[in-house]
Image: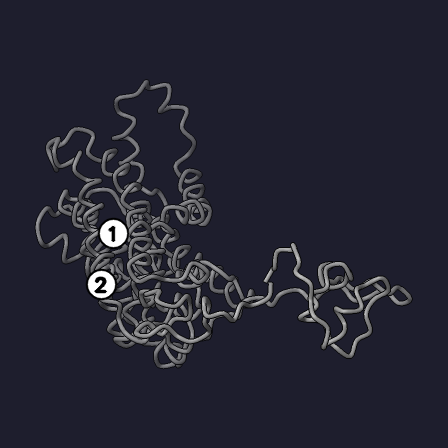
């Protein structure tokens, strides 16, 4: 369409708005998100405090809301407590994702950058991301195995690697109320232990579905949001918040058997330790998937010490468990090695978005017709005012329309301008 120049439209900015539009129109200035570091959606130049507060309030509020049924039915004395905690825990694991979505709305994250901001996409460069994923399956299992044997070396737990008497004792207690024929049909204890060990990597992948619900919040959104504080403060603060978020279940005796501040303190310590490893994987890979898979592998291997312990005493999970004090020490050694070898150095850039595909090259010998606007090519639609005076009139056209000195007759045609 031709642009009207009669004053109704103006290409000058409206006064007081800085916006171009109709004269007299008052447009509100656009609200923009926090500036990004180097244009990266996962690296804000400053901490988006409003979004961080919204994230914490939503994540903690939903966690306690999900746990209300247990607390209202007796708390730690509720019937079938273990089953209720398992179901509640699975539901809680998705609350950080909801909180991350709320935080992105508050921070006005552009829709086209949200998957990149959370580290969900792109999975490029593929070699780097895939190797981090493979390491994320194996590394937590190796850490838990190391914790078991270090704890045994320190005299904190007795192992039975032949008869697996502790595991047998636990099975006998579970089968006590069943038909004796069922207990007699059980496979040998060694085979059961082997199956349990072989299932850990597969269990890690299954647990990743639920772990991703947490990691999209903790390492996907919160860690990058706190990154302007610096690498180490962001890692440590994220770990503390992650540990405190578990309080609705920890105060029921979950994981450690304590129903007071001791259980919460142990959980915070364990989450800080594992959070440094998961956060390192997130920052070094620029992807949330290694952290989610590592979290799933941790959950899948959490019962390893119970599987290998000898009968006659229940292991103190606050010491020898996957979140206990020995684990803190083992992870501290690993983190020190990573730091000394420069693995906490510069973080890689996000993979660039894939460029648009180039159009197909022309086929030799074939000339494609040019696509034009029929209104400006059909002589019947040619506007005399816009016609070039030097251009001869088409055959059959009014000669006066091509003569600058001629007087135009009135026309019934509606001006399309």
The residue closer to the viewer here, 383 or 91, is 383
Against 133, is 37 above or below?
below
Q: Is residue 117 visible?
A: yes
The residue closer to the viewer here, 71 or 308, is 71
Residue at x-position 42% and y-position 34%: 188
The crowd level at tag 2 (other Cα within 10 Å; few <14, some 14-19, many 20+) is few
Residue annotated with mark 1: 158
Q: Secondary structure at mark 2?
A: helix
Disc 1 + disc 2, Cβ < 8 Å = no
Name which quarter of the figure residue 120 lies in. bottom left
The crowd level at tag 1 (other Cα within 10 Å; few <14, some 14-19, many 20+) is many
Q: Secondary structure at mark 1?
A: loop
Placement of the C terminus among the 4 image quadrants: bottom right
Placement of the N terminus among the 4 image quadrants: bottom right
Residue annotated with mark 2: 50
Question: Percent x, y for residue 151?
Answer: 25, 59
Q: Is residue 277 visible?
A: no
Residue at x-position 18% and y-position 55%: 244
Question: Percent x, y for residue 146?
Answer: 34, 61
Residue at x-position 10% and y-position 54%: 262
Name which quarter of the figure residue 356 lies in. bottom right
Question: Percent x, y for residue 180?
Answer: 33, 19
Per the model, the C-alpha gap separating discs 1 and 2 is 50 Å
């Amino acid at each position: 369409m031709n642009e009207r120049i009669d004053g109704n439209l103006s290409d000058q900015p409206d006064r007081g708005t800085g916006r171009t539009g109709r004269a007299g129109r008052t447009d509100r200035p656009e609200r923009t998100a926090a500036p990004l570091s180097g244009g990266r959606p996962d690296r804000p130049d400053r901490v988006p405090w409003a979004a961080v507060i919204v994230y914490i309030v939503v994540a903690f509020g939903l966690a306690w809301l999900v746990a209300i049924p247990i607390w209202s039915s007796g708390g730690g004395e509720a019937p079938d407590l273990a089953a209720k905690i398992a179901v509640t825990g699975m539901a809680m694991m998705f609350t950080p994702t909801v909180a991350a979505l709320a935080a992105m709305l508050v921070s006005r994250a552009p829709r086209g950058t949200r998957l990149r901001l959370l580290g969900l996409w792109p999975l490029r460069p593929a070699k780097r991301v895939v190797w981090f994923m493979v390491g994320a399956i194996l590394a937590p299992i190796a850490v838990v195995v190391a914790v078991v044997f270090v704890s045994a070396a320190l005299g904190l737990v007795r192992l039975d690697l032949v008869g697996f008497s502790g595991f047998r004792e636990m099975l006998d207690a579970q089968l006590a109320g069943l038909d004796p024929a069922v207990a007699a049909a059980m496979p040998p204890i060694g085979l059961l232990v082997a199956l349990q060990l072989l299932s850990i990597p597969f269990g890690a992948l299954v647990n990743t579905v639920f772990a991703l619900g947490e990691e999209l919040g903790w390492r996907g959104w919160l860690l990058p949001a706190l990154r302007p504080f610096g690498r180490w403060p962001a890692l440590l603060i994220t770990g503390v918040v992650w540990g405190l978020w578990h309080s609705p279940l920890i105060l029921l005796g979950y994981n450690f058997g304590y129903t007071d501040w001791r259980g919460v303190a142990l959980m915070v310590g364990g989450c800080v330790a594992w959070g440094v490893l998961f956060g390192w994987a997130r920052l070094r890979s620029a992807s949330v998937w290694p952290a989610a898979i590592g979290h799933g592998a941790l959950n899948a291997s959490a019962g390893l010490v119970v599987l290998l312990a000898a009968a006659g005493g229940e292991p103190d999970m606050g010491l020898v468990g996957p979140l206990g004090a020995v684990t803190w020490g083992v992870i501290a050694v690993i983190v020190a090695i990573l730091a000394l070898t420069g693995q906490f150095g510069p973080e890689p850039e996000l993979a660039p978005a894939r460029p648009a595909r180039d159009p197909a090259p022309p086929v030799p010998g074939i000339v494609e017709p040019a696509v034009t606007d029929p209104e400006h090519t059909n002589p019947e639609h040619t506007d005399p005012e816009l016609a070039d005076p030097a251009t001869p009139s088409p055959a059959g056209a009014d000669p006066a329309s091509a003569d600058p000195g001629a007087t135009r007759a009135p026309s019934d045609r509606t001006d399309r301008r």
